Amino acid sequence: MRGPDTALDLRTEDLAPPTQQTGWKLGPIAGYTAAALPLLAQARAALATAVAADRAAGAAWDEIAAVLDVSADTAARRHRT
């Protein structure tokens, strides 16, 4: 059985600088930025899929735009397929 210190240990790990967290390795200059790029690409793909699904389900551009905090014209221009 784990004691009450376990939760504290997890929080301490979460608050550690990225260089001290598991999975982060020092690399070239701007290495953290480079490591984040695939995540950005995945997020953009997920957003495009979600917008297409909402449109297929009948959502109007102004409804999608409200969620994205942009105008309906901007939402349509960015996500129209």
Image (tube, rainbow, N blue to C red):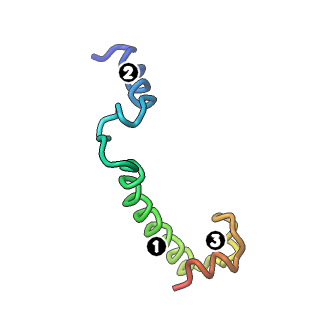
Where, quadrant-wise, is the N terminus in this rendering? top left
**Distance between mark 1 and mark 2 Cα atoms:** 37 Å
The x and y percentages for residue 78 are: 58, 78
The x and y percentages for residue 79 are: 55, 78
Amino acid beneath label 2: Asp
Q: Secondary structure at mark 1?
A: helix
Q: Secondary structure at mark 3?
A: helix
Q: Quadrant of residue 20?
A: top left
**Which residue occupies 40% across, 59% down?**
37
First reached walking from the N terminus: tag 1 or tag 2 = 2
**Which residue occupies 39% across, 14% down?**
4
The x and y percentages for residue 58 are: 60, 80
Relative horizontal placement of residue 30, taking residue 23 as reference (left or right):
right
Q: Nearer the viewer, residue 32 or 51?
A: 32
Relative horizontal placement of residue 40, taking residue 69 as reference (left or right):
left
Relative horizontal placement of residue 75, taking residue 13 as reference (left or right):
right
Q: Nearer the viewer, residue 5 or 12?
A: 12
Q: Which mark is residue 9?
A: 2
Q: Which mark is residue 11?
A: none
Q: Does the residue at mark 2 contact the one at mark 3 (Cβ under 8 Å)?
A: no
The residue beneath circle 3 is 64
Above or below, comparing residue 70 to residue 20 in the picture? below
First reached walking from the N terminus: tag 2 or tag 3 = 2
Q: Which mark is residue 49?
A: 1
**Which residue occupies 67% across, 70% down?**
65
Above or below, comparing residue 59 to residue 5 in the picture? below
**Distance between mark 3 and mark 1 Cα atoms:** 13 Å
Amino acid beneath label 1: Thr
**Which residue occupies 51% across, 85% down?**
81
The x and y percentages for residue 45 are: 43, 69
Q: For mark 3, does the 10 Å Cα neighbourhood hold few (<14), some (14 to 19), or many (20 or more) residues? A: some
Q: Quadrant of residue 38?
A: bottom left
